[in-house]
Image (cartoon, rainbow, N blue to C red):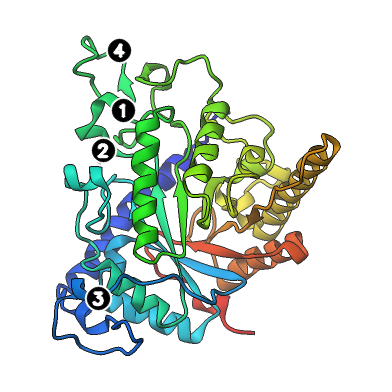
Amino acid sequence: MQFYWSEKILVVLIIILVAMAGVSFYLQDIKIIFFSQIATVSDGSSGPLSGPIGTLSVPQKLSNPPEIIKAVYVTGYSAGSKKYLDYLSNLFKTTEINAVVVDVKDYSGLVSYNSGADNAQKYKLYDHAIPDIDALVRFFHNQNVYVIGRIVVFEDPAFSKVRPDLAVYNKINTTDLSQPILWQDNNKLSWLDPASKEVWDYNISLAKDAFYHGFDEVNFDYVRFPSDGKIGDMGFPAWDGKTAKSEVIKDFFNYVRQQLASQKISVDLFGQTTISTDDMGIGQVIENAFENFDFISPMVYPSHYANGFMGFDNPAEHPYEVIKYSMDTALARQQTFNNLLLQNSEAADSTAKFRPWLQDFNMGAYYTADMVKDEIRATQDALGNDYNGFMLWNPSNVYTEEAVLPR
């Protein structure tokens, strides 16, 4: 399946906006000491600390997390800014937002904080966007805000650079496999081989470290093969080219659940996985995620659907209809999946819940508060008793407050 031009433009816009937003917030607050002022000591009291942050015990997960998660996406640099955290605090007080999705590892491959994961330490793959991760988690937990750590998995220029032997390489330009030339997508970003178990273990180590620091959930993104660029030029050090891409991704799903058996984990999938029956050339089949994650988060951004979808010249102008249909279809496919398990005398343990990403950015149409409300309403109407919330995406990290005011 071909992905039309708006998806490619969105990726470029995301990269630019994330960088601009992150640098802007970060430069406005260069005082890293802020984190020592908001940290909470182990007895639950808060205030300035006289000793180093490292002497505190690590945060624990929320003991009573919200039942319905209503989250916003936050880059590492935004999370490292006092000015931006002030903005978030006001958002928590005045709206229904009760959760954040914070980048642990973003599209650059760099980790937002000094992770204890072996490879992150060995290769210094962190950018200190978040000066003190424990203080940040305490800051959110003190407001009863659920903290989700986002890990971009296979799109990873930083790890590809230091471990080219694990990365997708350009088989046209590479003459010596001991010195591979990295393949790049249309945005000049390098990817790791989705079939590499060493790559799997690296990302899982980042997830384990995030859980150690009190994250309530870890969200895996870019769990797929590349979708754009000169696909025919790709070479893989681990994938044999014969095993179906969907089987490679399914094996990763299974492995993640085995390694993080007791943890809450979620996965982001293309919105079209709700309606497509093939793997769209990237390895994503929604049924393969049903038994392995607590939450499945299809990115049902209306701007990402091809013109003509559902008969709409511009699907972005019809958020309710697009999302309602997508989530209706996703739920129906899960119910069919569970019925098949029962027919085969297997326990229907597809316990994954749907919690989609919704569009709160202008693409394809100008997104008003009413349009964002329509997206939320469509999610509620489609899922009914299975409604478990939503996550809002805006690469600038500034959200439409009028859309999420308390009822």
- What's the amino acid at mark 2? Phe
Q: Earlier in the sequence, mark 3 or mark 4?
A: 3
Q: Which residue is mark 3?
A: 56
Query: Helix, strand, or loop for circle 4?
Result: loop
x%, y% of residue 179? 19, 18
Camera-near label (2 vs 4) is 2
Front residue (pair 269, 207): 207
How many neighbours does mark 4 have within 10 angstroms: few (below 14), some (14-19), or many (20 or more)? few
Q: Residue at 52% across / 82% down in the picture?
A: 95
Whole-Å distance between the Cαs marked 4 and 1?
15 Å
Q: Which residue is mark 2?
A: 159
Camera-near label (3 vs 4) is 3
Mark number displayed over residue 167: 1
Q: Earlier in the sequence, mark 2 or mark 4?
A: 2
Above or below, comparing residue 1 to residue 269 in the picture: above
Above or below, comparing residue 278 to residue 316 in the picture: above
Left or right: 314 as drawn, with respect to 161: right
For residue 84, which quarter of the picture?
A: bottom left
